[in-house]
Every structure is written in structure tokens, then in C-alpha cells.
Image: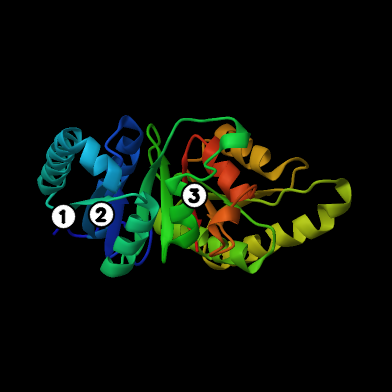
Amino acid sequence: MNLGQSCPIARLAKILVATERSAFSEGAVREAINLAKKCSSTLYVMSVVETNPEYETIGAEFLQKEEQEAVQYLKSIKTRASEEMLTCEVFLRRGDSPSRLIVEEANQKKTDMIVIGRRGRRGLEKVLLGSAAAKVIGHAPCKVLVVPKAARIECKNILVATDGSEYADKAVAEAIEIAKQCGSRLIAVSVIHAEEGKEKAEANVGGVVSAAQKAGVAIETTTPIGKPYEVISETSAGRGVDLIVMGTYGKTGLKKLLMGSTTEKVIGMAGCAVLVVK
């Protein structure tokens, strides 16, 4: 096991990375390995072969080939992890609901974080809606890190979004802890829809400033007017942010899962990794 070297995220004894075996998962795999190395974490790598009874009957030969390719892919990741002296376990699951299987594994393994990839940017009307990523975020027992394929997490500049809610407060605490561990610059953003919300937004970021200063973390704030997901995404791009930390409203019905939420849309638009704190 690799000795911890400035682990950016506390309490990461076990990391589960779920990969769909495509280029979109490469960022998640790469950053999960990097985090496991820095945090002396046990790394679990899983992939799901989607199937159903009819498919198993009609496409048995194709299914067998897909499973063989998946096994080889997982072995290649285990080799990468072994080269970094990591404790790594890989496994393949079969089923018709990848998100459910991922959450089940996270519960069984008692993982501290799930790492998943994100497909390319899409129109907002389609951003993550009904996707495995959104369902994992909604039902995961732990925090979830969503990593676009080209994103690299260096924790130089961290953005935390707050609306003053208890959910945002948890994200703020996490962001401050990461910034403290890494010596990062922290940017606190509270977006308003109109000028009359300015006072509340300033109070929101003021609370973050107070907590950050107590932790010895350098911080700047902004309370712009606009659509939250657009402002957060644009701010992260313009300030060289490599990690956005946000909260979510916990478990909801699958039909309403994160639909229209700021967190979901930021994940779909941002060019950097997004850590969703439960």
C-alpha cells in the first residue's frame, strides 16, 4: 500500500470507480487511481454488462464476447493500479440497471466515495436526465466524484457553490477541508436571480469566508446575477478551477431525480470534476 501523500479528501479508505469501458470513463479511472495513491485507499473497480433475459437468449454469443472484452479491460486497470502499488479489486456485474448495481456495490463495500465518468456535453434538456450518473448521485450512500474524460484534479483552485441551505453547508465544510489539505485557493459563489437577493447572497458567502479564515484557507467570493448553473460553470472556467464542490438534496424518487437541479446541470456543463457531497 502506498503511503499517503497529501490526501486531498479526508476519510477515503475505500474508493469505488465505476467504468463503462469507454473513453468517457478514462478521466474517472485516472483520477481514482491518483486519489487512491495519495490517500492510501483500497480501490474497487467495477463495470456492468447491461443485459436482460431476452438479450441473453437472442444475443448470447455477442454477450459472451462483450464480457470477455470487459474482463480484459478490467485486468488492464488492475495492472495500472498494481504499478502504483495499490490494493485493487476488479469485478464485473451483469444486469439491466447499472446505477442500481453501482449503488449496491458501494453499500456492500462501504465505500467512502464513488468515482464515475461523464459523457460529452449535451443540450441542457438532456443533461444527465435518466442517466446512470444522475441515479447514482441520487441514491449513493457516499459522496460522488464526476470526472469528465479530460479533467485533472490538482486542487489548485476549488469552487464551492452555496445557497445557504444545510445541503450547501456540508459542501462548504468539505471544500474548506480539501483546500486546507492542499493549500488551495477557494472561491465561494452564491448566485442571485435579481438584485434584491444580493443581501442574502452576501450573507451566504460571508459564512463561508468566516469558516475558511478560521481554517487558514485563502478565499475570494462572488455574488453574481444569473442562472446558477451557467454562472457556476462560467466562473469555474474563467478562474482555472479544477474541482467544483456542491451539495445535493439527498434521495428522491427516480422520476424526479435531480431533474432541473443546479447540481445536475453544472455536472453536465462544467469542464472540470464535480464532487457531490451527500
Report the amino acid beneath label 1: Cys
Q: Which residue is mark 2?
A: 36
Identity of the residue drawn at 16% across and 47% down: 81
Please indicate whether residue 194 sits to the left or right of residue 104 in the image: right
Identity of the residue drawn at 57% across and 59% down: 248
Disc number placed over residue 88 in the picture, else none: 1
Q: Earlier in the sequence, mark 2 or mark 1?
A: 2
Disc number placed over residue 134 in the picture, else none: 3
Along the viewing direction, whichever of 170 and 120 lies nearer the viewer: 120
Please indicate whether residue 227 sits to the left or right of residue 39 in the image: right
Report the amino acid beneath label 2: Ala
Q: Secondary structure at mark 2?
A: helix
Residue 9, image x, y percentages:
38, 59
Q: How many marks?
A: 3
Answer yes or no: do the residues labelled 1 and 3 have beta carbons within 8 Å?
A: no
Q: Nearer the viewer, mark 1 or mark 3?
A: 3
Along the viewing direction, whichever of 56 and 229 lies nearer the viewer: 56
Q: Nearer the viewer, mark 3 or mark 2?
A: 3
